[in-house]
Amino acid sequence: MTENDLEGKFRTGLFVIAMILTLIATLHFYFSVQDVIGTWFEYQYESIFSAVFSFAVIVVCIYLTRFYIISRR
């Protein structure tokens, strides 16, 4: 096993660990924002603000996915 091959595997493993931690942090942030919406807004408006927040998350995810796919070409 060459040093370059070992370094590539290390970088890949580090990237995978970082992505898993990012996913966990993102999910925690998402559910925390849902709790904040429930605290800050009246009951009848909670679903509206939750829908707007969820839509914003979807838009950002689509944008990042498109950006990643376009940058790979």
Image (spheres, rainbow, N blue to C red):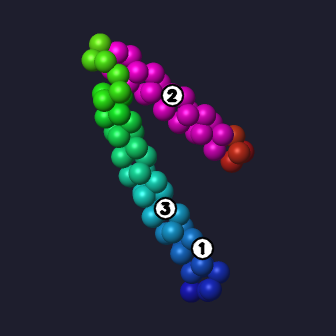
Q: Quick one: 7 or 20, which is closer to the camera?
A: 20
Q: Say if mark 2 contacts mark 1, CB within 8 Å.
A: no
Looking at numbered disc 1 in the image, what kind of residue is underneath it? Answer: Gly
Q: What stretch is highlighted in magenta?
A: 45-68
**Residue at (61, 86) in percent of width and height:** 2
Looking at numbered disc 3 in the image, what kind of residue is underneath it? Answer: Ala
**Residue at (35, 33) in percent of width and height:** 36
- From mark 2 to mark 1, how far is it between C-alphas? 35 Å
By secondary structure, the bulk of the magenta-drawn segment is best described as: helix
Looking at numbered disc 2 in the image, what kind of residue is underneath it? Answer: Ala
Q: Is residue 8 above or below residue 16?
A: below
Q: Quick one: 41 or 21, which is closer to the camera?
A: 41
Secondary structure of the residue carrying tag 3 is helix
Residue farthest to the top? 44
Q: Which mark is residue 56?
A: 2
The 10 Å Cα crowd at callout 3, few under 14, some 14 to 19, many 20 or more, is few
Provide the residue designation for mark 3. Answer: 18
- Locate residue 35, reporting x and y percent: 31, 34
Q: In this view, does 62 lie above or below 5?
A: above
Provide the residue designation for mark 1. Answer: 8
Secondary structure of the residue carrying tag 1 is helix
Question: Does the magenta segment cover residue 47?
Answer: yes
The 10 Å Cα crowd at callout 2, few under 14, some 14 to 19, many 20 or more, is few
Q: Which mark is residue 41?
A: none
Q: Say if mark 2 contacts mark 3, CB within 8 Å.
A: no
